[in-house]
Amino acid sequence: YKFNPYTYNSNREKVFLEPLSTEGQGLEEYPDRKRYKLLQLSLPVGGGLKYALSDDVHIGVEMGFRKLFTDFLDDLSTTYVDQDVLLRRRGQQAVDLAFRGDELKNSTRQYPPHNTTRGNKKSNDGYYFGLVRLSFRMNWFDNTYGNSNRSNSRKLGCPSWR
C-alpha cells in the first residue's frame, strides 16, 4: 500500500508530514532515525459471512485487520526531538506540527523536552474494519442481451456484442 501522512495547519491547508521529519527522521543529529518509506507491505487478515435472502438478494458481514510493518502511518512513533534542531533543519512549520497540544483552547502547554515520549516504537500500526453488505443481482445483464429470446433471463453474464 502507499500512504502519505498529512494534517491541516491553522490555515486549514493540507500539509504532508514525512518531509518535515517531525521525529528527526533523516536529520544528521539523529542518525538512528531513518526516513520512512511511503510504500509498505501489509498483512491482510479477515473473514465474513454471506447469506442469500433470495436468488437475487444477498446480505453479508465482513471483518478485517491489516497488520502494518511501519509505525508511521500517523507519523508518530518515538520521542520528540530537540525543538531548536527541528526549527533549524526543517523550519517553524515542522515544529508547529510536531507538537499540537498548544492548539487546544486555553492551553498553556509548551513543546515537550527532547526525548519525551511521543509514540510507542515497540508496536507497529494496524487497523480494523467491518462492513455490512447488501447485494442485488442485476438480471437485465444476461447472455441474451440484444436478442428477442429472453428465456434464459435468470442467467447472469456479460452482454453478447457480436
Image (spheres, rainbow, N blue to C red):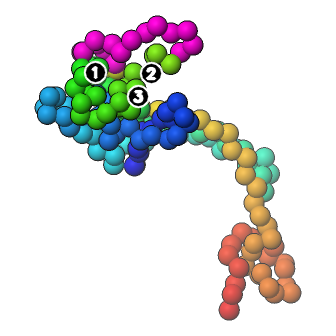
Q: CA distance from mark 1 to mark 3?
A: 11 Å
Image position, residue 11 (x, y; %): 54, 35
Residue type indicated by callout 2: Arg
> For residue 116: magenta?
yes
Q: Residue furthest bottom?
A: 162
The one nearer the camera, 42 or 162, is 42
Q: Which residue is mark 3?
A: 97
Q: Which residue is mark 1?
A: 83
> For residue 89: magenta?
no
Residue type indicated by callout 1: Gln
Q: Which residue is mark 2?
A: 100
Q: How many other residues sit within 10 Å of disc 1, few (<14), some (14-19) or many (≥20)?
A: many
Q: CA distance from mark 2 to mark 3?
A: 6 Å
The span picked out in magenta is 104-118
Position of the C terminus, as image quadrant, is: bottom right
Q: How many other residues sit within 10 Å of disc 3, few (<14), some (14-19) or many (≥20)?
A: some
- So how many labels did they put on this image? 3
Marks 1 and 2, the one that precedes in the sequence: 1
Residue 77 lies in quadrant: top left
On screen, residue 60 above or below 92: below
Residue type indicated by callout 3: Leu
On screen, residue 154 above or below 106: below
Image position, residue 4 (x, y; %): 41, 44
